[in-house]
Amino acid sequence: MSLLFFLSGLFVWNSLQRKGIARFGRDRATRLGLPFAVAVAFLAPAAYYPTFVATAGGQTFLRQWLLLGEWPSGPAWFIWILLSYDFLATGVFLMMPQLGDRPSRLYARVFGSPARFFWTVTAVSGIAYVPMALAFGSARWTVYGPFMFQTSRLAFYAVWFFAGLYAGAYGIHRGVIAPDGALAQNWLRWLGWAWAAYGVLVVVTHPAIRTTMPPSWRELVAAIAWVQSSTATTFWLLAMFLRFSHTHIRIMDSLCQNSYGIYLVHYLFVVWFQYFLLRAHLAAFAKGSIVFLGALGLSWASVAALRRLPAVAGIL
C-alpha cells in the first residue's frame, strides 16, 4: 500500500500543472469517485454474498447486510482515501504553485540521493505511524458507512502519497526516480536491505521474542520494525521496476493497462473462488494457486472486455 500511495502521488503535480485545479478535480472525481460508488453499491455486496450463503441464518441477505450498521467497501477503501489526498494536493498546489521549479538545496539533496530519501521517508512515516499504532493498535479499522480506513495508517499513507507528490514535482525523470539513477542501478542491494529489514520484523514479532519484552516496548519495537520493513520493500520494488522500465513484454503491457480495473474487481472473483473450493479435497497450496490464477485471469479478461467500451476506457 505504501508503494501504491507513492505512485498515486507521483504524477499529481504534473497533472495539476497541465490541467489546472478545476479540470483535475473533475477528472479525479470521475476516475476515482465513480468507480468507488460502483464498487460500494454493487461489487462489495456481490463479493460478500458467499459469506452470507455459508453462514446464513433466518434472515435475507439484504436485511443482514443492512443490520451490519456499516457498508463494507472491500478493497475500494483505497480509492476514497486516494481521492481525499488528491483534493488535499490541490490545496498544496494553490499555496505553492512553483514547487519543484526552483528547488532549494535541501529539497534537491533529499530527492537526489536514495539513501537520504530513504531515511527521510522512514523518519517522517515513523513519526506518523508509531504513535498511532501505540494508541490504537496496528489492526484497528475505523468505519463510517462505506468509508473505512486503517486507523493507525491514515497519516502513514498520507506521508507516502505526498512523498510521491514532492518527488514528482522535483522531476519524474531525475533524482531518486530517474530510470538510470542510483536507485535503479542498485536494485539488488535494495533487495538485500528489504530482506534484512523483513527479517528483523519477523524476529521482533516472533512470540518467543515478544514474550521477553514488556507490552509497551513490544509494540514500540514492532511498529518501528514494520516501518523500516515497509520502506525498504517499497524502495526495492521502485528500484527493480525502474531498472527494467525499458523492457517491454506485450502481456505485461496489457496487465499495466488493465491494472486499475483488476484492483477494483479482483475481490469479487477471489471470494467466489474460495467459496466454490470450500469443500474441495485439495491441499492448501493447490487451492491458493487456483484462487490466485483464476481470480487474476477472470479479473483481467473482464476488465479488458469492459475497456473496449469508450466510456469505460476513459475511467478504467
Image (spheres, helix red, strand yellow):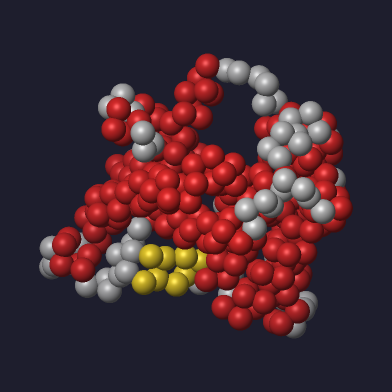
Q: Is residue 8 left or right of residue 108?
A: left
The residue lying at 66 percent from left, 44 percent from top is: 168
Residue 202: % across, % down: 72, 58
The residue lying at 36 percent from left, 33 percent from top is: 314
In the rendered image, the vertical position of residue 212 relative to residue 16, given as above or below: below
In the rendered image, the vertical position of residue 216 relative to residue 226, given as above or below: below
Any part of residue 271 in sight: no
Residue 204 sits in which quadrant? bottom right
In the rendered image, the vertical position of residue 271 relative to residue 228, given as above or below: above
Residue situated in front as seen by the camera: 32 or 289: 32
Residue situated in front as seen by the camera: 134 or 256: 256
Q: Is residue 207 left or right of residue 54?
A: right
Residue 295: % across, % down: 39, 36
Residue 103: % across, % down: 78, 50
Residue situated in front as seen by the camera: 35 or 96: 96
The residue lying at 68 percent from left, 38 percent from top is: 172
The residue lying at 61 percent from left, 81 percent from top is: 135
Any part of residue 263 in sight: yes
Quarter of the figure with the C terminus: top left
In the rendered image, the vertical position of residue 314 relative to residue 73, given as above or below: above
Q: Is residue 8 left or right of residue 191?
A: left
Residue 223 sits in which quadrant? bottom right
Residue 230 sits in which quadrant? bottom right
Residue 289: % across, % down: 47, 35
Instruction: Tell how many labels.
Output: 0
